Amino acid sequence: MSDLETYLASFDAEPGYLNWAAFGPLSPAVRAEAHADAELLGTGRRSGIELVSARAAEARGLLADQLGVDADDVTLQPSTSTGLQHAFAGLEGTVLLSPREFPSVTVGARRAQDMRGRLRVAPIDAPDGFVTADAVREALTDDVTAVAVSAVDYRTGYLVDLPALREVVGDRLLIVDAVQAFGVVDADWAAADVVCGNGYKWLRAGRGTGFASFSARARERIEPVLSGFAGMDGDLSDTEVQPPLPGAAAYVVSPPDPLAAARLATAVREIAGVGVDAIAVELRRRADDVFALADRYGVPVLTPRDRHAGIVTLVPGPQNAAPLGAALANHGVTATARGGTIRISSHAGTGADALRLLGDALAEVSAARAHTAVVAPTDR
Ligand SMILES: Cc1ncc(COP(=O)(O)O)c(C=O)c1O
C-alpha cells in the first residue's frame, strides 16, 4: 500500500460520520500513542517522563515544517481561540474582520478592544461570509493594522485565497484561523503573520492540541500581553518578574500538556508522511461527491464550488430542513444542522458507504417532496 492508501485506510469511524468540521474522531495512531504515553507517565520513571515531555518540541518542529516557518515561531496552545486571544490582546490600531467569522475571531477581537482600548474592530462587508481580496480592499483604511480571517469558513466552507489577501493587506498583519483547513488544505501559510489552529478536527488528534505561529513582523507589533510564567525570560525562582521571552515563546501562559503534544505530533507526522497536497486532492473529491448528490436531489448549496475544502453546506429550504435532518439521523448520518442549513463535512478517508447513506437520506426527502407535490392538489 502507498502512504496515501495506508492513510485513507486508517479512517475507522462509524460509516455515516460526516461531521469532521465539528470533531474529528481520533486516528488509530493517535489513540495508540495516547495509550503508550499515558503508560509512560504512569511509571514515575524519569526517562519516561522526559520522553513524553520531549513531544512538545517535536510537535513544534513538525508544525513548523508544515507552516513553512522556524520552530521558534511556533507555540503550542490549548486551543485555536487561545492563540487568537494572544494575537488580539496585544494588537493596536484597527483590525478588520467579517462579523460572520466564527466567534473565536469576533469575540476574541471584541474582548481585546474592551480590555485595553487600544484596538478597534471594524467590519469587512463579506456577503455570505466569503472574505475575498476585493472585500478586504474595500474595507481598508489608513488606521487598519491587521486583518483576521478563517482560512476555511466554518459555515459555508469557503476557502480564502491567502496569497491574494497578503497582496491586498501589504505590510499589515494577516491573522489566520486555520482550524478548518490545517492538514487538509495545501495553503500558503507563510503568507500569514499569525496562524492559529487545533488538531481536534481534521488532524484527528483530539482536543487540547492547539498551536499558533507568530512571524517576526507579528512579534514586533503584538505585545505579549497575556504572557504567563512559561513565556517569561528568566529564572522561575527569581522573585522579580522578568520580561517575556524573545520569539513566539512569549505568547504562552503555562507549559503545554505533553500528552496533548504527543497526540498532535503523531497526527502531524501522519499527514507529513502522506503529503497535504495528496490529502487535499482526496478531500476535494469527497466534497465533490457531496455536491453531486445535492445536485441529483435538487438541494441548493451555499458552498462555492470553485473555492472549497471539506465542508459542503446544504440549504434545503424551510420546508425540507427538518425532514432532511430527521432523514439523516434515521440513516445514521452525523452532520451539523444550523439555522436552516445542513453542513456536511467529509474527510479524505470518508468511504463510499457514508456517501451512500447521505444519498439515501436525500432520496427519501426528495421522494416525499415529489409525493406531496402530486397529492397536494387533490387534498385541498
Ligand atoms: C473557524 C473556527 N475557529 C475556531 C473554532 C474553535 O476552535 P478551538 O476550540 O480550537 O478554540 C472553531 C470550532 O468549530 C471554528 O470552526
Image (tube, rainbow, N blue to C red):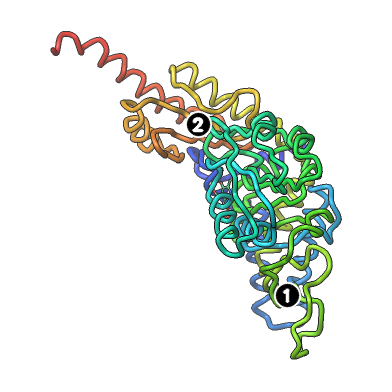
Q: Is residue 178 visible?
A: no
The percent coordinates of residue 377 (x first, y second) are 18, 9
Q: CA distance from mark 2 to mark 1?
A: 41 Å
The three-letter amino acid code for the residue at tag 2 is Thr
Crowd tier of the residue under label 1, counting other residues whose Cα lies within 10 Å: few below 14, some 14–19, many 20 or above: some
Q: Is residue 18 visible?
A: yes
Report how many numbered discs are placed on residues in the image.
2
Describe the element under mark 1 as helix, strand or loop: helix
Please state, as top left, top right, bottom left or bottom right, where the N terminus lies in the image: top right
Judged from this view, the residue extending furthest toward the left is 380
Left-right relation of 158 to 355: right
Q: Residue at x 51, y 33 (%)?
A: 354
Crowd tier of the residue under label 2, counting other residues whose Cα lies within 10 Å: few below 14, some 14–19, many 20 or above: many
Q: Residue at x 74, y 64 (%)?
A: 223
Judged from this view, the residue extending furthest toward the front is 142
- The image quadrant of residue 254 is bottom right
- Ligand 1 within 8 angstroms of badge 2 C-beta: no
Judged from this view, the residue extending furthest toward the right is 70
- Determine which residue is flagged by label 2: 313
Q: Which mark is first along the chain, 1 or 2?
A: 1
The percent coordinates of residue 335 (x first, y second) are 46, 39
Image vertical order of residue 358 relative to residue 275, above or below: above
The one nearer the camera, 269 or 57, is 57
- The image quadrant of residue 308 is top right
- Ligand 1 within 8 angstroms of badge 1 C-beta: no
- Determine which residue is flagged by label 1: 230
The one nearer the camera, 140 or 257, is 140
The three-letter amino acid code for the residue at tag 1 is Ala
- The image quadrant of residue 138 is top right
Instruction: Please tell me the numbered disc located at residue 219.
Output: none
Q: Residue at x 81, y 77 (%)?
A: 233
Describe the element under mark 2 as helix, strand or loop: strand
